[in-house]
Amino acid sequence: MLSSRKQAILKAVVEEYTRTAEPVGSELLSEKYRFGVSPATIRTQLSELAEEGYLMQPHTSAGRVPTDRGYRFYVNTLMQERELKVPEKETLRRELFGEEVEMEAHLRHAVQLAARMSRSLAIGGLFHRPQRFRAGLAELFSYPEFYEHETAFQVARMIDELDRHFEKLVEALENGEPKVYIGRENPLGVRDVSLLVSGYRLGGELPGFLALIGPTRMEYARNLSLMEYMTRLLNRL
């Protein structure tokens, strides 16, 4: 088990990297956070976290970035729940309940809203109907992680083969709880993305799913809160 100080440092690294997409160094942590130790001690702790598999150093002179293991520990242990802001909830309610339209039109609009508010690729569908809705590809490719040609190609191929991955998405919802797959854990075959997936019953009847795909440094707490709130709304449509 990580010491409380290492946990605090790991939490700071994850949240700084999520915000900036830049490797995080000991000087920044010392200046911005009150760990009560010197930059040299923080540097030692960063090195130990790297040796233990929670962080990695992308370049010799750079700071550290989280690994899949670091993100998993953060999500399971360190992440604080984050409620959507009242204006965000009002926007979702207004836009989803504002018009009397067919169920699938509601779902299409929900996917578009999820993509916009999460800045991720959003995918939604009903289990027993062939049509899948997706939105947010431009949002996904706006992240610097996907500027590299090979990574972008892998993501594009994953989207092209989405129907083949559909069964894996369904399997992820066995117990009805939202699922978080980080990096290599995700069932979509792309190691540099994370997947959040949740089920619902559209209008309380038709079973379906909503998924968000984004970089491994996505805002997990906010996106989980967004998905949970949206699935509650979809259940009520």
Image (tube, helix red, strand yellow):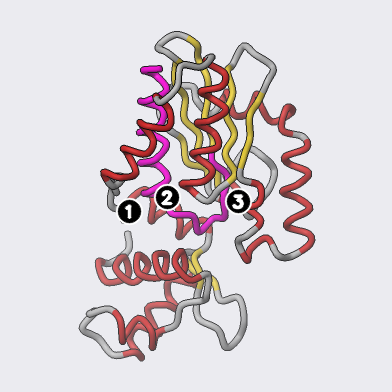
Q: What stretch is highlighted in magenta?
A: 212-237
* Left or right of 110, for residue 73: left
Q: Distance between the residues labelled 3 and 1?
A: 19 Å
For marks 2 and 3, the one nearer the N-term is 3
Q: Is the magenta stretch mostly helix, strand or loop?
A: helix
Badge 3 density bin: few <14, some 14–19, many ≥20, Cα 10 Å: many
Q: Position of residue 173 (x, y in %)?
A: 50, 25
Which residue is denoted by mark 3 in the rendering? 193
Which residue is denoted by mark 2 in the rendering? 220
Which residue is denoted by mark 1 in the rendering? 79
Magenta stretch holds residue 214? yes
* Left or right of 176, for residue 90: left
In this view, the mark in front (2 or 1): 2
Quadrant the C terminus occupies: top left
Q: Position of residue 210 (x, y in %)?
A: 52, 30
Q: Which residue is located at x 43 percent, y 54 percent?
A: 219
